[in-house]
Image: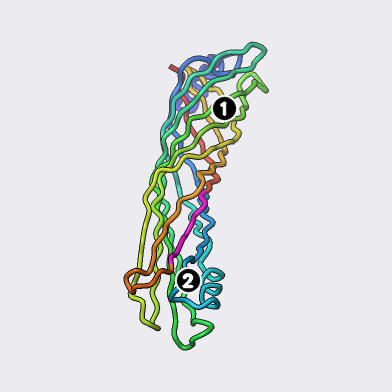
Amino acid sequence: MRSVLFGLTTAVLFAAAPAMANPQGPYGGFNLGYAMSDADTNVDITDQDYFVSTSITDIEANFPGNLDDDNFTFGFFGGWMWDLNNGASFGFEGDLNWLNVDESATTMREYPCCAPFEYTISEGLERNWLATIRARLGVDVSPQLFVYATGGFAFGDADYRISFEDNDNPIPLTSASNSDTLTGWTAGVGGEFTMANGVSLRAEYLYVDLGDVTVSRDLSNIAADDTFHANADITDSIFRVAVVFDF
């Protein structure tokens, strides 16, 4: 009996689905996805004072250089679409998503000039949220499937930190951090399958480039002028699914 009722309900739902898939008017929903977050990092040392040239070259060449963290993401979104006729629609969408990026890396090496003395340099990155404001343009490819391209602005937080110490002079632990809200761009593609009663299922890919965050720190704690300038260039590749409700 349950299977019969389920079959009848399913048939009614699909029979009630709209004739065309292109979305129109206001909508909202929530998403769940997987974010492959990447930060390409580098460091430059200026105002040479404490370090000899070979030490600077070695530190810059062996800086960890990359902070990758794959993590789950979830959030909500809303937007408005306009019918352009012939199955095409155009509109705007905004979303807010939570991330859980927390990655760090450390390099420990002997100074090429001065073994057995060693230095240790570390870096870390934390991120908690990502938001976008995007345009969407798409067309129907079947009575229930709408495909689209999307692009616009991206915003997100970044807390980047570095630290350095050695056992030569010695340099005590020297650290610095920069917490900032970054602005960049995003682009992607997606598809929506229209169900009944104003509900759609969506699959979407977004590429996000937030630009970079920098940290600078000198060695004034040992009366030296050498200054570390570290930089992290942040990008994301996000695959996600969503449930969309037409209002």
Q: Residue at x 62, y 13 (%)?
A: 84
Foreground label between 2 and 1: 2
Q: Is residue 220 magenta?
A: no
Picture coordinates of residue 34 (x, y %)? 50, 46
Camera-side residue: 123 or 37?
123
> Which quarter shows the C terminus?
top left
Front one among 142 and 108: 108
Q: Secondary structure at mark 2?
A: loop
Residue at (53%, 68%) from the top-left corner?
Answer: 60
Q: Amino acid at mark 2?
A: Gln
10 Å neighbourhood of mark 2: few (<14), some, or many (≥20)? few
Q: Residue 137, image x and y in percent?
A: 60, 23
For the residue pair 86 and 93, the one nearer the viewer reads as 93
Most common SS among magenta residues: strand
Kind of residue at badge 1: Glu
Residue behind mark 1: 192
Segment colored magenta: 227-234
**Label 1 crowd bin: few (<14), some (14–19), many (20+), radius 10 Å:** many
Q: Which label belongs to residue 48?
A: 2
Label number found at residue 80: none
| First-in-chain label (2 vs 1) | 2
* Mark 1 residue element: strand
Residue 69 position in % (x across, y down): 48, 55
